[in-house]
Image (cartoon, grey):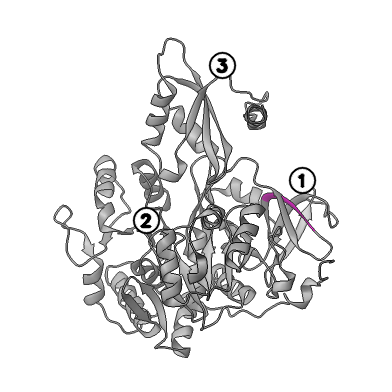
């Protein structure tokens, strides 16, 4: 049967999204239904009225600490209500939030604290020893306030401020008026680039407000919807989910991390309608010897952050009777740029869908980045819309490469079909995708080079059914050194967040490079591919 023909303009017309500060989305939803459950976390159920009161308390608390518009606060916790409350509270008084991966090691924590010039950090109590180690090794002149989850001052850090005490001692009334423009910064998430350490991405109130509403409008979510969210809040995907479900007045059920059986229990207990995931979890659900009947209230599995393998997706659909859809986006776009149409009959599983409302797209010639290509022809995907970042923090050259005349050059290769559906055929050429997270090879290569025995290095991603890709290092050893690959792996992984860990190292005589010194990773990938084929 031929696919149903569609015209994208019929269901993605321009929408007049409000120009308001980020916290206004929560406040508007609370005004519509103050007693609806907003956040469920273990046995805690918070209504919209209660979430707004908590946001006001923390916003007033931050103001009383002397934090002012433009200051930055890092959030260093797993998924929990304090994270969301602090994010929106900071936005209420013009403070910029910089999410931080709770899996970070000392080197990565120090980099983000220093680069973001954060004046405060909210940290989960269990992570305090890690922060103390970082603070003992280096001074951070901007860092003035350490907020810790819980109710008590930690003995090892008496200067820290318990989150519960800050909330208890601050007013639940609306915070002091701060003049906030929709073009002011609200978030500084760090995006892994191909050139080394992650770059801070400058996102404004307009960026996040627009994208939260693009998300809810494209998916058609409403006050009756319940989302299960285990994807990490520090990732831009998680930022979109928690913000988007507060914006539409829905309910979000929060998990600290993915647990398959627990997720089934929560789906049944709370009548979950949206289950957001990444491709490795599609694979896990498709292959797990469990009955998915407890997911009977689900409308969709929504996959993002990495290319969706089709076989596990079809298998999951057949096993569960629930539609699997995929979207597309990136940190630089707040993140959502593409989603499937609302009509289930129009969904194309192998496509990332259509541009969301108020989003323009072109497929341009890869070499020049200028000539627009016709349907069916592969080129670089470029995007323009209200969700596109202002640029990279302290990186004008990177910003100029990525943003040209308002268009974001994604570095991803794809095409559109005759109906306007977009297909991704290749990712950013350098990035390694591990369980939906981007890993910069250059960062791992730089770390490998710190080992005294390493003369040169290169890192690539090798295919893995569960993770998508695993980082593999190729290393040239200096003459006179006696070292094993396992010792090199242990050295590097002791300084890396878990998702970045190098899984194997191979010694090699020379790293293939062009005359300018750029690593020819394609040659190393071809070598791996030929070995697997053999």
Q: Is residue 11 above or below residue 303?
A: below
| First to last magenta residue range | 411-416
Quadrant of the image occupied by residue 429: top right
Residue at the left extreme, as displayed: 155
Q: CA distance from mark 1 to mark 3?
A: 33 Å
Residue drawn 59% across and 57% down?
330
Q: Is residue 457 left or right of residue 411?
A: left
* Magenta stretch prevailing secondary structure: strand
Residue shown at 65%/80% (left/top)? 16
Identify the image quadrant of the N terminus. Answer: bottom right
Residue 263 is a magenta residue:
no
Q: CA distance from mark 2 to mark 1?
A: 38 Å
Question: Where does label 3 land, which residue?
Answer: 509
On residue 118, the disc is 2
Q: Nearer the viewer, mark 2 or mark 3?
A: 3
Residue 225 location in percent, x, y?
A: 52, 79
Residue 239 point in image, percent of width and height: 48, 64
């Amino acid at each position: 049967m031929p696919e149903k023909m569609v015209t994208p303009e019929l269901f993605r017309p321009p929408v007049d999204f409000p120009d308001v500060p980020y916290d206004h989305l929560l406040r508007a939803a609370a005004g519509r239904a103050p007693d609806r459950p907003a956040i469920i976390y273990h046995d805690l159920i918070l209504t919209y009225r209660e979430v707004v009161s908590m946001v006001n308390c923390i916003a007033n608390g931050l103001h009383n600490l002397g934090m002012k518009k433009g200051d930055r606060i890092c959030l260093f916790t797993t998924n929990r209500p304090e994270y969301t409350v602090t994010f929106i509270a900071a936005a209420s008084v013009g403070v910029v939030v910089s999410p931080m991966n709770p899996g970070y090691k000392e080197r990565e924590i120090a980099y983000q604290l220093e680069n973001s010039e954060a004046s405060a950090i909210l940290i989960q109590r269990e992570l305090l020893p890690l922060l103390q180690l970082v603070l003992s090794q280096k001074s951070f002149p901007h860092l003035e306030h350490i907020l810790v989850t819980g109710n008590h001052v930690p003995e090892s850090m008496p200067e820290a401020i318990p989150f519960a005490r800050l909330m208890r001692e601050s007013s639940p009334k609306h915070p002091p008026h701060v003049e906030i423009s929709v073009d002011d910064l609200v978030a500084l998430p760090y995006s892994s680039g191909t050139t080394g350490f992650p770059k801070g991405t400058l996102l404004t109130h307009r960026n996040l407000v627009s994208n939260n509403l693009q998300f809810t409008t494209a998916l058609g979510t409403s006050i009756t919807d319940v989302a299960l969210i285990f994807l990490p809040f520090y990732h831009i995907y998680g930022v979109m989910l928690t913000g988007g479900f507060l914006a539409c007045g829905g309910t979000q059920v929060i998990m600290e991390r993915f647990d398959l059986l627990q997720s089934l229990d929560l789906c049944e207990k709370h009548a979950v309608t949206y289950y957001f995931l990444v491709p490795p979890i599609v694979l896990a659900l498709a292959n797990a010897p469990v009955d998915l009947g407890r997911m009977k209230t689900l409308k969709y599995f929504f996959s993002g952050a990495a290319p969706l393998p089709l076989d596990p997706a079809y298998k999951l659909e057949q096993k569960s009777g629930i539609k699997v859809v995929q979207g597309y986006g990136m940190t630089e776009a707040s993140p959502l740029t593409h989603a499937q149409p609302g009509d289930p009959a129009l969904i194309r599983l192998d496509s990332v869908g259509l541009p969301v409302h108020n989003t323009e797209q072109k497929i341009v010639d890869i070499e020049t980045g200028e000539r627009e290509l016709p349907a069916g022809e592969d080129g670089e995907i470029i995007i323009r819309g209200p969700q596109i970042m202002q640029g990279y923090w302290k990186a004008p050259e990177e910003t100029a490469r990525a943003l040209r005349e308002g268009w974001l050059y994604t570095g991803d290769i794809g095409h559109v079909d005759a109906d306007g559906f977009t297909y991704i055929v290749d990712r950013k050429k350098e990035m390694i995708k591990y369980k939906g997270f981007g890993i910069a090879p250059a960062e791992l290569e730089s770390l490998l080079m710190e080992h005294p025995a390493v003369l040169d290095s290169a890192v690539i991603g090798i295919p893995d059914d569960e993770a998508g890709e695993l980082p593999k290092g190729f290393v040239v050893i200096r003459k006179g050194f006696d070292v094993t690959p396992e010792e090199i792996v242990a050295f590097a992984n002791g300084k890396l967040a878990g998702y970045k860990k190098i899984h194997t190292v191979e010694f090699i005589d020379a790293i293939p490079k062009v005359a300018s010194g750029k690593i020819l990773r394609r040659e190393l990938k071809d070598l791996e591919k030929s070995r697997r084929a053999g």
